[in-house]
Structure formats: C-alpha cells, structure tokens
Image: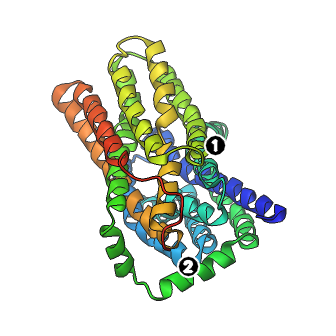
Amino acid sequence: MKKEARVVAWGVVGLCFLALALAFSARATLGLVMPVWSAELGWTRSFISGTAAVALIAMAAIAPFAGRLVDRHGPSAVMAIGLCALAVGCGLIAITSSPLLFVIAFGGLSALGFGIVATHVVSTGVARLFETNRGLAIGIATSGATAGQFVIVPLIAWVMTTVSWRWSYAALALASLLLVPLLLGAMRRGKDAASRRVAGANQAASTFAGDLGYLVRRPVFHALFWSFLLCGYTTTGIIETHLIPFAAFCGFPPLSSATAYGVLSAVNLVGMIAAGWLADRINRPLLLGAIYLIRAAAFIVLMNVGASYDTLLVFAVMFGVVDYATVPVTASLVASHLGIGRMGLTMGLISAGHSAGGALGAFVGGFVFDSTATYTIVWWSGVWLAIAAGLIVLPLSDRRDAAPA
C-alpha cells in the first residue's frame, strides 16, 4: 500500500471510530435521560424501555441488509445513509414531546442508523482497505463502540445538566451530520471505488439467496454465528443490562457501580485494539477461544464479589479485556474464511445473532432474578455458555489465504 493510500486508510479507521462512538452514545443516552423524561414528560419507564426494545428488533432485522448493501455498493454511501438517519432521529427527539413521534424517531429512524452505523458495517468497510494489519485496523475502528460510553456520554451528561436534554440530542444530530462529508471523502479517496467494482463483479452472478445458501452450507459460518450469538448473551444480554443492578444488589452506591462499569468500558477499548493486533500475529481460533474462556472465568470472579468493591473492580478489568474483543477476531476470520465479497452479509447475519442472544440474556436475567431473588443462576449460565462458545471456535483452521469472494 502506497504512503498516501495508507494515510487515507488510517484516516477512515479514525472516522469510523468516531461514527461508532456517536451511534453507541446515542443509544446509551436513552438510559441517562430516562428519569428526566419520566419527570418532565410523564413517560413511563416501561414505555421508554419498550421503545428501546423495538429499536433492538429493528437493528437485528436491518443488519443483514445493511451488510448486503456494503457488499454490492461499498461502505461509504451506506455509512452516510446511516449517519443521516441517526441525525434526523436525534434531531426529532430533541424537538418533540409527543410519544408517537418519539417512537418513530428512536424506534424507527435512529434504529435505522444504529443498524447501519454498526460494527459489522465498519469492520467490512475497514477490511476492504487493508491487506496487512487488517485485524489491528478493525480493532481500532470498532473500539469506537465502547469509547463513546466513557468519552461522549459524560459530555452529553454535562450538556444535559448545564443546558437541557434537548441540546444533548441536538448535539448528537449535528455531530452525525458533520461526520458525513468527512467519511464520504476519506472513503472515496481510499480503495472504496475499487472495492465497489470488485464487489459488483462478484455479485453480478450472485443473488442474496445464493450467498445465503453458500453461508448456510459452510460449517465455519455456523461456528462463528452460534458463538457470536452466545457472545451476545454473555455481554449485551446479562452484563450490560444487569451488572449495575447486580452491583446495587450487592450494596454498592450508584456512583461506585457506575465507576466500575466505566472501568470495564475503558479496558474494553484497549482489549479490542489488543485483540485486533494479536489477530494479525497468532492463531485466531485459539485467540478467540481463549477470549471466551477468560470471559467464563470472569463470571466466576463476579459470583464471588459479595461486599468487596475491589473484587468488583477485578471483574471489571478482567471482563473488560475480553468484552468486545471477539469483534475484530471474528471479523478477521470471516474475511479470510468466507470472503471479502460477502463479508457484509455474513457479518450482518452474525450481528443479528448477537442481538438475538443479547435480547435473550436481558430477558433471562430479569426473569431469573425476579423468580429467585439472586443472580447466581444467571452468572452460571454465562460461565457455561462462554465455555461452549470457546469450544465451538477452537476447532476452526487458521488459514490466512482469502476465501473466494
């Protein structure tokens, strides 16, 4: 890769990092603003949470189609559409007091943005730009998904407390719009145009059903899909949803609980980048399996927190290292084993499985706690399902030659 192309490619990585940080911050802000909406607008928490659930379902449905669009037309236009949808959705939320318009804005338009400005689209777009250091580039770009939780969300909270929650969403809308021309320009200066030509040639004789049939017949797709579904259960499902309530259950005050979660998020960013760097250098199935097994061990630490805040912090660091670390390794395996030309569709389907696993974990966690008044069974389910995910991916080969596109 020439020096200029290399600079542009890493510029795209940085902009994708920012795009994911904005999208994931817009999602996280919902929980931050929920008490304010309840007091100011009279919206119940069940209504707001129900709208969030609608958005998650929409994201799972959108993911494969967004990935397919990247395969056929390249990532630049797709990312631009996602950022514009996110901007319009956040803009509408900033000006509305109508429950119906809020559902349309967050559960519809913003969900469209969340489903497109997502790790599967970013990892596919970045993979097209790199032949070497691909894992590292994917790791850095997708780590924006966690960076927003401890960089942008505190800024949003500051705006909300000093001015208004409406200005918080207005700022997200403006930032998303400003990022569109920068991302379009950088991607088009890179290899995006050539990638579109290659993708178009590959897809000319291939239909959605044909590619789907190809994937369903490949054991490696099933290994990555089902392991990532279990990944969703053990991360988005039971940790992101239930860690802070569990910390409160253990007797820790809100600030201490939030601090522990912030530590987890900060370490998460480092873990994603480190996993991407390692994916370029060591056996990837072994690395992915180890990530899942370390996650299983972290759940055992969590079950022994008791009243010890130090133990909670140990868990936060241990789990943070492997929380989203599966993303760059899984994406790297998809690129080499299933082909760049259908990587968008593949990662979209895998991401949809992750969302389904997350939804299941969130529900199971709440149901089990309501039934037993303890999280012990929930954490044990995390142990065994993380082990299962590790055992699923360990037998995969680590070939580095690209699969047919």
Residue 156 x, y percent position in the rendering: 62, 42
The residue at the point 65 percent across, 61 percent down is 131
Q: Which residue is mark 2?
A: 199
Front disc: 1 or 2: 2
Q: How many marks?
A: 2
Measuring from the top left, give residue 256's x and y in whole percent: 50, 20
Three-letter amino acid code at disc 2? Ala
C-alpha gap between disc 1 and disc 2: 35 Å
* Secondary structure state at the residue bearing disc 1: helix
Nearer-N-terminus badge (1/2) = 1
146 left or right of 294?
right
Please tell me how crowded label 2 is: few (under 14), some (14-19), or many (20+) other residues with Cα within 10 Å: many
Residue type, numbered disc 1: Ile
Q: Which residue is mark 1?
A: 152
Relative to the observer, which residue lies in front, 266 or 328? 328
Q: Is residue 137 above or below residue 282?
A: below
Where residue 31 sits in the image (x, y, percent)? 46, 42
- Mark 2 element type: helix
